Image: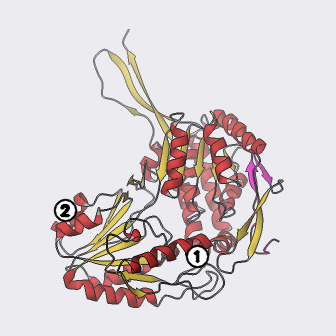
Amino acid sequence: MQHPDYAVPALFIDGEWITETPRKGDVWNPATGEVLASFPFAEPEQVERALESSAAAFELWKKTSYQERTEIMHRAAGIIRKNAEQTARHLTLELGKPLADSKGEVENCATLLEWFANAAANHQDRTLDEMSGFTNRTVRKEPIGPVVAFASWNFPASLATRKMAAAIAVGCTVIVKPAKETPASFMAVVHALDEAGLPNGVVNLLMGNSSEISKHLIASPVIKKVSFTGSTPVGQQLAAMAGEQAKPCVMELGGHAPVLIFKDAAIEKVIDLAVATKSRNSGQVCISPTRFFIEDAVYDQFTEGFVKGYGSLRVGDGLEPETQMGPLANARRVVDIDELVQDAIKHGARLLAGGQRLDRPGNFYAPTVLADVPDSARIMQEEPFGPVAIMNRFSSYDEAIEKANNTDFALASYAFTGSQDNADRLADDLDSGKVGINGFPVVFLDSPLGGRRLSGYGSEGGYEGLDAYRIVKFVSQSEI
């Protein structure tokens, strides 16, 4: 069965679109539980063909001028914008997020292509200071080689584009493996690049059995780097496989972001910001604010306001214009989140809103707020990755920092205060890859995206994201 408004999923190997393979999987609409389409599983010989084409294309692409790469990537961005309405609809059908959010993600794909293309051309080799006895000393940045990129389902188009755009901008070739829940969203970007004149083999797109494909790709001597966004357990497995061959990785893994709210913050404004940010993508965001720690003096005010706003969100199909929060990506998410919520209640947490699956077709879970959650509850150390917010107290600055840093995850942290002294201290004391002070935006085109500890390592985004796909060579030329 093929939904009439949904893209036909296909592999893209060496410039060829392939829709028919012996094995198939189903793509489900998380808002209705209906099958949208079947997608082809890449067979081992097709994975090998993708590797061969990636290796061959690299020898040509790395020698292609920055100007030519930039022109292709800019043309592709224009094509993405031309087809944005249709692509956004495909994205909402397979993931469930509100259509307006899908349109924003599609636009982000176009912007990522443009930014990385321009940035790569302006961020090249550097010459060291003159030194007696040497005519030249240069630090060269060369493309590392063919890369494999594994993208998560929560931002299926933009996450894959962020990896791919940075890699091809500096001269690498890329094999992209999207998540099985969302195989079609990134196809629009590949279509645009193909139409824009990207040479065959520079980008290959594979779908199918994740474990089988990842093992095949990482084990291949063709692949020189691995980039992954997803859960910590899967990231650890992939990193271990890469480590057997000393292959470098970029790992953007799970998070469990704390939010510190001090009594001198603009509480009403923070409530509105927190509700809007927590509802984004149904909480299925690695940097989503989850553990709210609120100073005693404003605890009741903030908690009551947040519950009122978050608990009244309109939850529904992302294609419906009044929807503010869509479904979860798959049925597993509903089960996993409910287990964490019920465990927290069992350990003494107070349920202030939600706490159950919605009685309707699809993978819907009510916006949920838990208060006074003890450290013994699993949810204090396990990322819920869904529409659940925790409200706990603190009475001093030191206590707030201790609570915020008290997990193995360290991807993003947030804090709200009216004191610049506090803001300066928080920037130093919050231990995570990204820190937002008096605001939730921490991901920009020109900023690095990466975590610490179980949240991963390496950077995506910004100039650091370009360097992730380069290898350094130092050249010194002596006087004769």
Residue 425, label in figure: 2
Quadrant where the C terminus sits is: top left
Mark 1, Cα crowd under 10 Å, few <14 / some 14-19 / many 20+, is many
Position above or below: 118 against 287: above
Quadrant where the N terminus sits is: bottom right
Position above or below: 70 against 4: above
| Highlighted range, magenta | 1-19
Foreground pick, 178 / 241: 241
Percent position of residue 133, x then y: 31, 14
Considering the numbered disc 1 on the image, is that residue within a helix, a strand or a loop?
Answer: loop
Residue 71, label in figure: none
Q: Is residue 357 left or right of residue 5?
A: left
Which quadrant would residue 191 be assigned to in this image? bottom right
Marks 2,1: beta carbons within 8 A:
no
Residue name at image x 75 percent, y 44 percent = 44
Q: Is residue 106 left or right of residue 25?
A: left
Considering the numbered disc 2 on the image, is that residue within a helix, a strand or a loop?
Answer: helix
Name the kind of residue labelled 2 in the image.
Arg
Mark 2, Cα crowd under 10 Å, few <14 / some 14-19 / many 20+, is few
Residue name at image x 51 percent, y 51 percent = 235
Percent position of residue 47, x then y: 72, 44
**Principal SS element in the magenta part?**
loop
* Circle nearer the N terminus (2, 1): 1
Give how far apart the Cα atoms at labels 2 and 1 are. 36 Å
Residue name at image x 57 percent, y 40 percent = 171
Indicate how the structure is coloured in the image: secondary structure
Residue 97, label in figure: 1
Name the kind of residue labelled 1 in the image.
Lys
Which residue ends up furthest to the top in the rendered image?
A: 480
* Residue 7 lies in the magenta-colored region: yes
Foreground pick, 69 / 240: 240
